[in-house]
Image (cartoon, rainbow, N blue to C red):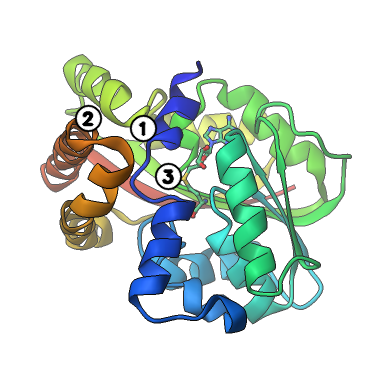
Amino acid sequence: MDPVVAFYDAHPINERQIQAALERAGKSRQSLRPADLYDFDQDHYGGLDAVAALADGAGVATGSRVLDVCSGLGGPARFLAERYGAEVVGIDLNDGRVRGATRLSAMVGLQDRVRFARGDATALPLPEARFDAVIAQEAFLHIGDKPALFAECHRVLRPGGRLAFTDWLAGPALDEGDRARLADGIAAIAIHDADSYRQFIAAAGFRDVAMQDLSPMWRRILRQRLEMYSAMRDDTVAQFGPERHAAYVDAYAFFVDAIEAERLGGARWTARR
Ligand SMILES: C[S@@+](CC[C@H](N)C(=O)[O-])C[C@H]1O[C@@H](n2cnc3c(N)ncnc32)[C@H](O)[C@@H]1O
């Protein structure tokens, strides 16, 4: 099985875990609104503020046609539909993520405004020039073929449409041992420094390529995310067993250490077709 698919098949954040969290929070399945999910369904760093920053970078407004590449359980897609009035399509490699995103969206009444399909970001099952904006969060680190990825993002955007995404950045001290450990523990198979990333984006034909360094913010928030995963122990053990919980927290701790030691960082990128 593809290691990225296997990684998300055993990820602590998943549809069942979200349902359990909703029950514990006393939310009735009969009367759920999109906002009831927001504490649980955002699988990236910085929560709704991070999605709002991307929406601004991509110029998302009422009626915008947005593609969320690597949409996971659909949290950002639902937020853009509900708060911005966007029409959102999400594509994800992982079938369980796509089915979970579809069910969670129907549960909060957004089934007509967000749609999800299984697909590979390097070969999008979508027509060209279909979208006003393409967004993604903390997902491109899983994708080795960056030329194909950015060519596809470019192809599906209308002329003038905008790309906005966040992802990890390699610092100068990131070494081969770090890369092997991050590939093994988090399926992070393709981590680039800022110059290489800029070249990949520009080579696909994008213009106005801009980067905002998020490393200082990530250094502040990622330890809390590690604590969140540690606190999810019971849910993770119930689904995947104690070894998976320990392995995940261990790999995540290595990632957070690398962020704090500045061997890794993060950035928000924007560009225009
Ligand atoms: C960290 S999750 C982010 C999910 C979502 N963007 C969010 O912020 O809640 C990364 C997602 O990327 C997906 N992914 C990884 N490689 C992919 C690829 N080549 N094509 C499509 N999706 C991919 C994974 O299945 C996973 O759901």
Q: Is residue 192 left or right of residue 156?
A: left
Residue at figure coordinates x 22%, y 30% from the top left: 172
Q: Residues within 10 Å of mark 1 (few under 14, many from 20)?
A: some
Q: Which mark is residue 26?
A: none
Closer to us: mark 3 or mark 2? 3
Q: Give the answer, above or below, for where 180 lies relative to 207.
A: above
Residue pointed to by mark 1 = 193
Residue pointed to by mark 2 = 172
Residue pointed to by mark 3 = 167
Rounded to the nearest whole Å, what is the CA distance between mark 3 and mark 1? 11 Å
Q: Give the answer, above or below, for where 272 lies relative to 94.
A: below
Residue at figure coordinates x 41%, y 65% from the top left: 40
Q: Is residue 259 visible?
A: yes
Q: Amino acid at mark 1?
A: Asp
Q: Amino acid at mark 3?
A: Asp
Percent coordinates x, y for residue 237 in the rendering: 23, 43
Rounded to the nearest whole Å, what is the CA distance between mark 1 and mark 2? 8 Å
Rounded to the nearest whole Å, what is the CA distance between mark 3 and mark 2? 16 Å
Q: Secondary structure at mark 3?
A: strand
Percent coordinates x, y for residue 231 in the rendering: 17, 58
Closer to us: mark 3 or mark 1? 3
**Reading the chain from its start, which is encountered first: label 3 or label 2?**
3
Q: Give the answer, above or below, for where 59 lies relative to 209.
A: below
